[in-house]
Amino acid sequence: MEQAAFHFATDGIPVFCELYGSGHINRTYLVETDTGARYILQRLSSVAFHDIPGLMSNIIRVTKHIAAKSVRENSTLHFIPADNGEYYYIDENGAYWRCYRFVEAICIQLPETPDDFYQSAVAFGTFQSQLSDFPVETLTETIPNFHHTPDRYRIFREKIKEDHVGRAATVQQEIDFYLSREEDGSVLQRMRENGQLPVRVTHNDTKLNNVLLDEKTRKAVCVIDLDTVMPGLSAYDFGDSIRFGASTAVEDERDLEKVSMDLNLFRIYTEGFVSSCPSLTEEERLALPLGAKIMTLECGMRFLTDYLDGDHYFKTAYAEHNLVRARTQMKLVADMEENWQEMEKIVRS
Ligand code: ADP
Ligand code: GN1
Ligand code: MG
């Protein structure tokens, strides 16, 4: 039993606790109390997050903003206060924990039907829409430069040079693939800096497994994993969803023959996202394909960076895990390059 569970104002006394979910960053547990109430208890990653009070302040304000606009009880996450009066508890090792209500719903890694993916688009589009009147400048940047792709390139180059674990020579082809696209990768950041694209409150980690679906109706219940909610571009949220959910295979598929971007899923997500986000400007809409390519390129490069650095950031199950992930993203980027005109056509239509 994790002692941390006892420090939150749960309904009843925790009697059951087990590891749960498949996220790459936090350590997640399912907790049940003697009244039958269920909660998610998480130990936050200290590698990823350096200002957890700031991060929790973002999340509490954003979830309250959404809850005030919704009639459905589970339209957003509900956090439970700890016995120190905060929404987090710090254990004797200095680790941060938080607790929130468990939502009875399903979480999937790939869409089982195109409609699953459409529903996730509506969920993330609605999320962004509901936060369109939230004061974006009051949000802490929980991971500075999170989707600043040129800065990700800077770190990538540093890790290649340091070559801490001596892996660089074995992945030269992969390194070259990412380095040769550095110029392409900087386009969104430039458009952000010159004001061509507006800064909005975005989720920034819009994988399909960060949205919960109702098991019976298959409609989206709520968006989860709010650690990276901060100022960003709509293209990031659109793009990261495509990267993960429009792929024909899971993110860590070893057989690259199975990996491609499904144009039909791309079309379906575009429809769901654009229709639930009516305030997108024309320029934002036209930048959506760029979001897909750049988020995929950036994420793949982050996996390779972590591989070169000895796998400190993303959870891995085996030695080559991050490399396998970096390769699926390469395949997806190449596929997008091949289908570029079609992607632009879909978005224009
Ligand atoms: P990570 O940052 O590690 O991805 P998440 O916040 O996404 O952590 O949580 C990991 C997993 O836990 C999710 O993918 C989901 O399966 C499950 N989960 C998280 N929050 C809830 C919730 N409120 N109700 C049910 N399941 C949840
Ligand atoms: C991480 O936390 P999780 O597993 O939903 C990561 C994302 C990556 C993703 C790749 C805070 O997401 O940025 O795109 O893995 N989250 C953080 O699967 O770095
Ligand atoms: Mg997650």
Image (cartoon, rainbow, N blue to C red):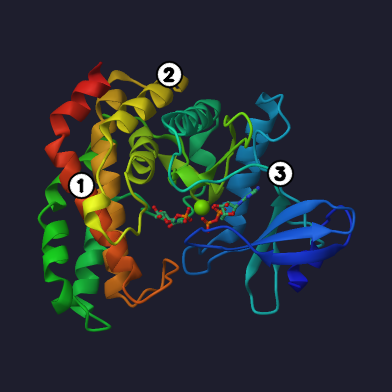
Q: CA distance from mark 1 to mark 2?
A: 26 Å
Residue pictured at 75% horizontal, 60% vertical: 31
Please say if 129 is above or below 88.
above
User: Which element type, helix, strand or loop, lies under badge 3?
Assistant: loop
Q: Earlier in the sequence, mark 1 or mark 2?
A: 2
Q: What amino acid type is highlighted by mark number 1?
A: Val
Q: From the top left corner, tell me how far across and down residue 148 is, in percent.
A: 30, 50
Q: Is residue 85 left or right of residue 254?
A: right
Residues packed near mark 3 inside 10 Å, few (<14), some (14 to 19) or many (20 plus) = some
Closer mark to the observer between disc 2 and disc 3: 2
Q: What amino acid type is highlighted by mark number 3?
A: His
Check whether the beta carbons of the residues at disc 2 and disc 3 lie within 8 A of each other. Answer: no
**Quick one: 266 or 72, which is closer to the camera?**
266
Residue placed under numbered mark 2 in the picture: 275
Please say if 262 is above or below 307.
above
Q: Is residue 10 visible?
A: yes
